[in-house]
Image (cartoon, rainbow, N blue to C red):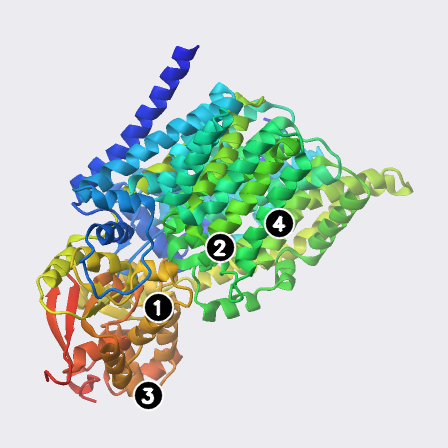
Amino acid sequence: MKTRRLLELLTVLLFCAILLYGFQIVRLTKSPYLPTYYQYENLEHISYGNDSGYMPDIQRDMPTNLLDIIMSKIGNTQLLVRLLPPLIGLINIMLLFFIVSRFAKESDTKIYLLSVLLSPVFLYYHVTYNNYSLGLTFALAGAYLLMSSLHLLAMISLILSFLVSPDSYITIFIIIIMLYSQYNSKKNIIMASMLLLLAIAIASVSGLASFRPPSVHYALKTTIFDLGALPGFGIFHILLSGIGIIRSWREKEHHILNYIIFLILAIMASINKSYMIYLDIILCYFCGYAIAYFINSQWESSLLRTYVTTLIMCGILFSGASFLTYLSRSDPNDKEMTGLRWLSMQEGGGNILTHYTYGGLIRVIAKKTPYIDTNYVDSSRDKLKLYETNRIFGSRDMKEVISFLEKNNIRYIMITEEMKHGLVWTKDEDGMLLLLQNTIRFAKVYDYLGTEIYLFIPIATR
Amino acid sequence: MKPQHLILAGIFLLSVIVRTMAAASSEYFTSDTSYSALRQIEHIAETGRPLINDSLSYGGRIHILMPAYYYLLSATTLVFPGILAMKLVANLLASTIIIATYLLAYKLSKNNNVALACAFLSSIIPLYIAETINDIDAIAIVLPGSIFILYLFLSLEDNNRVLFTLVPLSLIVILTSASSLIVLFCLLAFIVICYLENIPIKRVQKEFIFFFFFFFFWSIFLIYKYAFQILGFSLIWQNTPSAIMDTYFKNIDLAQSASSIGPLLLLFGLSTIFTYLFRKKSKNAYAMISLFFISISMFWLRLVNAELGIVFIAESTILLFAIFIMDLYEYIIKTKLERHSVLILIGIFLLAVGWPLSASAQSVLDSLADAPTEKEISAFVWIKNTLPEDAVIMSPATSGNLITYFSSRKNIIDRDFLMVTDVDRRYEDVTKFYNVKIKVEAISILEKYGSEYVIATNEREKEIVDSNICMIKLFESSVNVYQLNTSLCSLKRI
């Protein structure tokens, strides 16, 4: 029996390894760059810890966590950021296998793991470098150790989870309360604790006086991968988890904690994307529940059963496959990188003005300081720089633009094709683009493969 | 062959013959959208794949479409090439509504005469005739397909083997048009009504609904997800420019839809709904009530195009009429009027049929009168033979597809709005071009789209373009072709 379980585990791990490392190989054959700009932001964190003399003019809050600090002490970071996430993915799948095996049937365990493995959120966090996947590892290890009554080790693991991924602290409370419920019959205390967490979650949202619910289209576009969110849940996962919740409602007494956790994580994920990886785990639980229902329940027509299960499997497979395909083709690309390398060869200080998504690239590749980057957008409360940038990009007022550039010590302005086609502007002469092309204070110093770099000439030089 | 089947075959053949003869009287299709469909069909016949990257429409755009209907018609063109053969096949498909209605009406009434009467009524739905007689429109599959699906779905009650027909048919209907959403909602509404009325539903029927739901969702999502990323919820309204949307539904209201099938039929339908919601119970009747309510709701919420919504309302009314007439018959035979029951029913049928019959005759005439003439098409052919290959032609949206099909030149706008991100701006510009007499504005619009050539399709447009001294008339006919005199009137020069 044990050998069979071991074989099952090895099969799951092999599948996981093929998926995650296979992706890295495919990506390397298509592009030498890491997928997504966000990874370059993360690389920047590492290099910040690596070299204290690096860019001394940067005065800002740098989000630092245990993983980045460790990584900064190890050489050859580029190779490591490709190898480490899939390895963490393998460990997480293994831990999930052990945990789920404790309470689910053998066949259901495989369904659940398959649903996790093909989930776009899980894939995203385990093929790109980030601290959240390791935070999940320690959280899962903590849960498993608590289940095995190894309390001290479990606590250490949960503390490590907090150190690696500090902004997902609520998850640790959830794990502790959930496991406490296994050993304690005082359901009222457990429920009260969960409701307290729910209240904290709601307060996190409502506490922000300026919080306004986004439009449905925007919410869908930033939540569902298939509609453009990165990271985002697969539409089939959401659909099936909805069916799973409806089906499980008949045994709601058994699932009440899951529902509340789901609710808490959904609220937290709506304001902090780092919770998505945890929400994904519970979403996949309900998704697996629905799939198991379709497979295990009695069907009057075997033909329809075959068709429906095939459709569901195709939907989930398609979701995972299309996500990996999308990510393997994602930016940055040669056009941007060539421009950035050219920029890195330019001497002199000054900041670079461009869209914030290129901020990490500017630091890591061009070795210059961007005026704004994703870290700022994610961490700043007032987002003043984002507001200012948008205003300046849309402005044709010469005085306003020049005063802004001088005030913020901007030396270069980098414009990419994406910025000109929807990311910032839609027409060739929109906003600041008109000024760049028609004012002597700007000199186009680079124009290659759609990327343009303008030098802002201060009055003294002129 | 049973007599009722002979009569049914007679009605079907009569419908096909009348339709085809009427369609054959015109060399061209009535609607310009048929030519967009024709380009797809010809492209599939040539390459085996639908035309996705279109270099002519809107000066270059991508098409997103449900391909089944185009594949079906392109397969027929391989066997019987030519426009006439395509018209025959389209009318043959559209006429299958007669058989579908007969089967479903028979299931509802268990009476051959009533089923035949309903089959006849379905053959003369005015808007359905107008949309399908001389055009290529997916409605010719969606409506009969949906009625067949409902018939087979209700037949699942007695026999699971119908699944072998039901499943492939569902695939075809779903892959023909996203409007098959009507069927999905109808099935879901049916479950809800049965649940509220405490009527058990056979397990296999629920399983079929699961299948239909997943396949619909899967295919729609696969095909339209990119469109949703770009257009958001305006995808539901096919990205139709707001200026058109504002007037489009104003012109077609529920009263008009009622008049399309006749007030008497609608009254009988409503009476049946009232009876079965509050007095009697019947699973089959609930399926029809679901279809009626879903058609109305989707029409009201503009989730389907107006014509399709009205046609579905009309069809569901006819099917409710089948139930009404049987109930009436059962009532009459219990009264002193029993001896005259047949006469009364025939009288009611004649009263009910009068309105749609006259309206459908008018529809046939209108549809054929609206078809472009040889003279009009000659202008587009002249463009193809004379103007440079990279010319961009300014035309109203209703002529855009004629430019791409007959002239093989780029247009600025046509009536396939999906996936065009700046459709509102283009529509506004084109409308402004044909409405302003100010030279500078007109030229700036032309220069904006890189166009030097303009067509004017009616007297008002001709008057506007003629009044512009910068336009040189190149071709004069029912449709005039003009060229911008760039040496004299370039915007830079002005």
A373 relative position to A441: left or right: right
Depth-wise, is mark 3 or mark 2 nearer the camera? 3
Contact (Cβ within 8 Å) of mark 2 with mark 1: no
Figure check: B74 above or below A200: above
Discs 3, 2: same chain? yes
Depth-wise, is mark 3 or mark 4 nearer the camera? 4
Q: Quadrant of the N terminus of chain B?
A: top right
Q: Position of residue B370 (x, y in %)?
A: 44, 64
The residue beneath circle 2 is B131
The residue beneath circle 4 is B294
Q: Position of residue A91 (x, y in %)?
A: 35, 30
Dot 1 amino acid type: Leu
Is residue B49 among the parts visible in the rendering? no
> Could you say which is closer to the camera, residue B160 or residue A18?
A18
The residue beneath circle 3 is B438
Dot 2 amino acid type: Glu
Figure check: A457 above or below A244: below
